[in-house]
Image: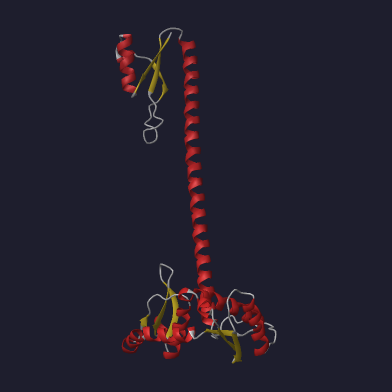
């Protein structure tokens, strides 16, 4: 006959056996089936298990060994499952970290590429050539009259009433003047339609004929130049006094007009377009070694 006793500790299990069998502790003959364990963070804890053989000791010992073996096997399997779960969790976390790093790198690379491309467009939009990474292209030849006729045909396809299109080519720059009853509409509110037409003409003329562009619509560019020069006077005075300065955030064509004006005004200083955290553009002016 075999009796089984369970408790939190071996001492408590032995006490239960002594009381139940009404014998002294020194006469208690028992086998340990399972040692107690606190588990992992309170999980998978184990109790102490002992068995006491009263009769048929040999058969009882065989049963005890079998039970002990099964208990140990269960314990090993449980620990293996816990270890497997922990490894899988670590693997998932590593994959998430790698994915996050890849996304961060991709976003950073994409953002830098966009900013670099926009800066190159602004610097070259009105005849400013980049001395770095200059690519030699085979452009088609065209004179001012031919280019003027092509722009007239483009304007005729639009819904705007424009009767004047004039083109002059000088120093690799195409000066385009447009005027008519709908000139104000072609400029648009705050010059956004003017900006769109400027980019459209520039991308076409520069990629096909190699010219840079200055577009004037009914004295809009001249009025914008006068306005921005007036607004920049406090900045100019600060630069002349302190040696450095920056503009407020500028929008659309005003950024390029201000850049051109400040570079002409301060040819020996570093003048460049920067981008704020909100994505707006402004111009910074300082010494070349203090960028």
Q: Quadrant of the C terminus?
A: bottom left
**Residue 6 percent across, percent down from the top left:** 37, 19
The way the protein has been coloured in the rendering is: secondary structure
Residue 5 seen from this side: yes
Of residues 138 and 191, the one nearer the viewer is 191
Which of the 4 quarters of the picture holds residue 227?
A: bottom left
**Residue 54 percent across, percent down from the top left:** 40, 8
Determine whether, in the image, residue 177 is placed left or right of residue 48.
right
**Residue 47 percent across, percent down from the top left:** 38, 24
Of residues 47 and 146, the one nearer the viewer is 146
Q: Quadrant of the N terminus?
A: top left
Of residues 122 and 115, the one nearer the viewer is 122
**Residue 117 percent across, percent down from the top left:** 54, 73
Which of the 4 quarters of the picture holds residue 170?
A: bottom right
Q: Is residue 81 above or below residue 211?
A: above
Residue at 58 percent across and 78 percent down: it is: 161
Residue at 42 percent across and 90 percent down: it is: 265
Q: Is residue 3 above or below residue 127?
A: above
Residue 172 seen from this side: no
């Amino acid at each position: 006959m075999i009796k089984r006793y369970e408790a939190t500790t071996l001492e408590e299990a032995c006490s239960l056996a002594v009381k139940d069998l009404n014998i002294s502790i020194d006469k208690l003959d028992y086998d340990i089936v399972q040692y107690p364990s606190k588990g992992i963070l309170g999980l998978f804890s184990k109790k102490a298990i002992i068995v006491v053989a009263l009769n048929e000791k040999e058969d009882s010992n065989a049963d005890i060994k079998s039970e002990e073996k099964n208990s140990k096997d269960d314990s090993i399997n449980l620990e293996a499952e816990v270890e497997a779960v922990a490894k899988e969790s670590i693997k998932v976390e590593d994959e998430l970290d790698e994915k996050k790093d890849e996304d961060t790198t991709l976003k950073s690379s994409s953002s830098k590429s966009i900013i670099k491309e926009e800066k190159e467009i602004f610097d070259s939009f009105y005849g400013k050539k980049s001395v770095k990474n200059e690519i030699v292209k085979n452009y088609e030849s065209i004179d001012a009259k031919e280019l003027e006729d092509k722009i007239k045909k483009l304007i005729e396809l639009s819904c705007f009433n424009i009767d004047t299109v004039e083109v002059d080519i000088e120093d690799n720059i195409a000066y385009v003047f447009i005027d008519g009853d709908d000139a104000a509409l072609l400029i648009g509110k705050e010059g956004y339609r003017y900006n769109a037409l400027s980019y459209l003409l520039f991308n076409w003329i520069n990629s096909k004929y190699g010219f840079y562009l200055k577009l004037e619509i009914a004295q809009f560019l001249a009025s914008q130049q006068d306005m921005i020069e007036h607004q920049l006077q406090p900045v100019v005075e600060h630069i002349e006094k302190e040696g450095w300065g920056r503009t407020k955030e500028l929008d659309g064509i005003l950024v390029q007009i201000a850049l051109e004006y400040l570079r002409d005004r301060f040819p020996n200083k570093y003048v460049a377009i920067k981008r704020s955290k909100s994505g707006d553009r402004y111009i910074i002016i300082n010494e070349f070694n203090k960028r």
